[in-house]
Amino acid sequence: MDKLVISSHNDFEAYLGKDLGESHYLTISQEQINQFADATLDHQWIHTDPERASRESAFNSTIAHGYLTLSLLPYLWEQIADIRNIKMMINYEIESLRFNQPVLVNSQVRLRAKLDSLADLRGITKCNLGIVLEIKGNKKPALSGNLIFLYHFIA
């Protein structure tokens, strides 16, 4: 899979309304879930206690934090597009985010992205991506919504 290379607002315009591609699959491990729990102080047993989750959870295993899956989106986006020639990128907004399906431990997820809209805000590119975080082998995605990034390209 070749990454898109985007170096300017004009480069983005060529993809308006189009599917931009998909990332590689990423496996969500128990270690990663535990580290996220430590970082966020969210040690709810459904995430961090595999034995209890296997006995008491409707999923029969631990699940990733919803915010863990959300936090992976910039990393996965970078696998789809190589944005060059920028002074700065800002995570600006998330619209219509919906957690559709829990991500079980050791599941594989990947990002699909579409360029829904683009605006030039006095030299700063506002990029609105329609995103879906897919779970391998599952028809229902982990999450869906719109990510909005601001890119300040070097003139």
Image (tube, grey):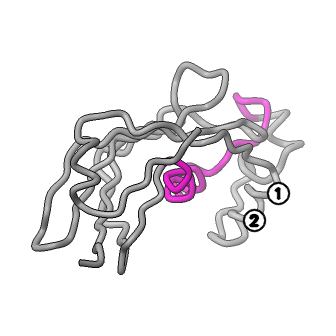
- The amino acid pointed to by label 1 is Glu
Going 69% across and 44% down the picture, which residue do you hit? 26
Q: Position of residue 110 (x, y in %)?
A: 59, 39
Observer-nearest residue: 115 or 144? 115
Q: Does 17 sit left or right of 56 as displayed?
A: left
Q: CA distance from mark 2 to mark 1?
A: 6 Å
Please report the residue visible at 36 percent of the width from the left and 42 percent of the height from the top. 145
Q: Is residue 140 magenta?
A: no
Q: Quadrant of residue 153?
A: bottom left
Residue located beneath label 1 in the image: 31
Q: Residue at x 37, y 57 (%)?
A: 6
> Residue 8: which quarter of the image?
bottom left
Q: Which of the image's four quarters has the N terminus? A: top right
Residue 130 versus residue 118: which sits nearer the camera? Answer: 118
Amino acid type for the residue under numbered disc 2: Gln
Q: Which mark is residue 140?
A: none
What is the secondary structure assignment of the residue under circle 1?
helix
Nearer to me, 105 or 126: 126
Q: Secondary structure at mark 2?
A: helix
Read off the residue under disc 2: 35
Span highlighted in magenta in the image? 57-80
In the image, residue 99 lies at what x, y percent? Answer: 47, 40
Residue 135, how many percent across, how many down?
A: 61, 31
In the rendered image, residue 77 lying in the magenta stretch gets the answer yes
